[in-house]
Amino acid sequence: AQKITQTQPGMFVQEKEAVTLDCTYDTSDQSYGLFWYKQPSSGEMIFLIYQGSYDEQNATEGRYSLNFQKARKSANLVISASQLGDSAMYFCAMREGRAGGTSYGKLTFGQGTILTVHP
Amino acid sequence: EAQVTQNPRYLITVTGKKLTVTCSQNMNHEYMSWYRQDPGLGLRQIYYSMNVEVTDKGDVPEGYKVSRKEKRNFPLILESPSPNQTSLYFCASSLFGAPNTEAFFGQGTRLTVV
């Protein structure tokens, strides 16, 4: 069964510094996608970045990059130059690709990491 | 504007009183799903739909019903709500269920059952 683990319940970072949020996953599928979402205190889910299992390059989106280590089954989110507005809950999620399987299309989420950015 | 719209945003109800949370998307997406978010558990899938009239159970379907009569709408029905269904609920849609398709989320519905 697919599983996502985020081992950091909370993280603190100083403004303008970089921070890494950890995510490990478990799947027996060869085709899958990894996503990171941000959830501010207002509650909405904001898509940040995506990495496909066959992508050879690490994904980047502005200040966000994904450190994808397939052999270790990890997909850590790196936020560079942290801003006060980055304070939020962050979720790692995985979507498997086996069409017709019972988990097809399902996003499996980790427990989340609360990031606090200090001025 | 491409969006997923959930209503209501907040709901307080009593045990046993049937309720419906609506979800509508304007992106012509085939795949829609419902999740609940609980502290320490992340989001868990309740039900999903791969297309009109095609629905199936997710990981935590007990106590919930869904229907998909039109492509754009995917309501979540609680026939007899109980306090353990107090949670934050999200509707999500994506073009397909393929692993490289982004899921778009509604604003969330915070449900309290007393």
Image (cartoon, grey):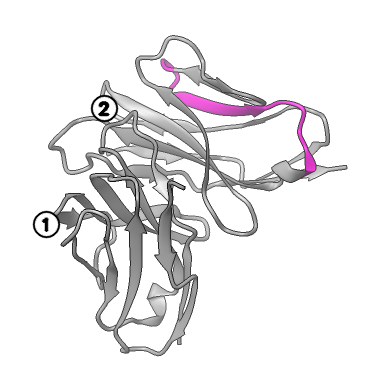
Residue A78 horizontal side relative to residue A55, left or right: right
How dense is the environment of label 2, judged by Cα within 10 Å: few (below 14), some, or many (20 and up)? few
Q: Position of residue B104 (x, y in %)?
A: 41, 45
With respect to residue B61, does A78 lie above or below? Answer: above
Residue type at mark 1? Glu
CA–CA distance in space, label 2 to label 1: 30 Å
User: Does the magenta segment cover residue A83?
Assistant: yes
In this figure, which residue is indicated by the disc labeled 1?
A: B53
Residue ID at (67%, 26%) = A63
Q: Position of residue B2 (x, y in %)?
A: 43, 46
Of all residues shown, which one is farthest toward the front?
B1
Report if residue B113 is visible in the image. Answer: no
Residue A118 horizontal side relative to residue A75, left or right: right
In this figure, which residue is indicated by the disc labeled 2?
A: A28
* Chain letter behind tag 2: A
Please tell me whether mark 1 sits on a helix, a strand or a loop: loop
The image quadrant where one finds the N terminus of chain A is top left
Residue type at mark 2? Ser
* Chain letter behind tag 1: B
Magenta-highlighted residues? A70-84
Residue ID at (52%, 60%) = B39
The tag on residue A60 is none
With respect to residue B22, does B2 lie above or below? Answer: above
User: Does the magenta segment cover residue A80?
Assistant: yes
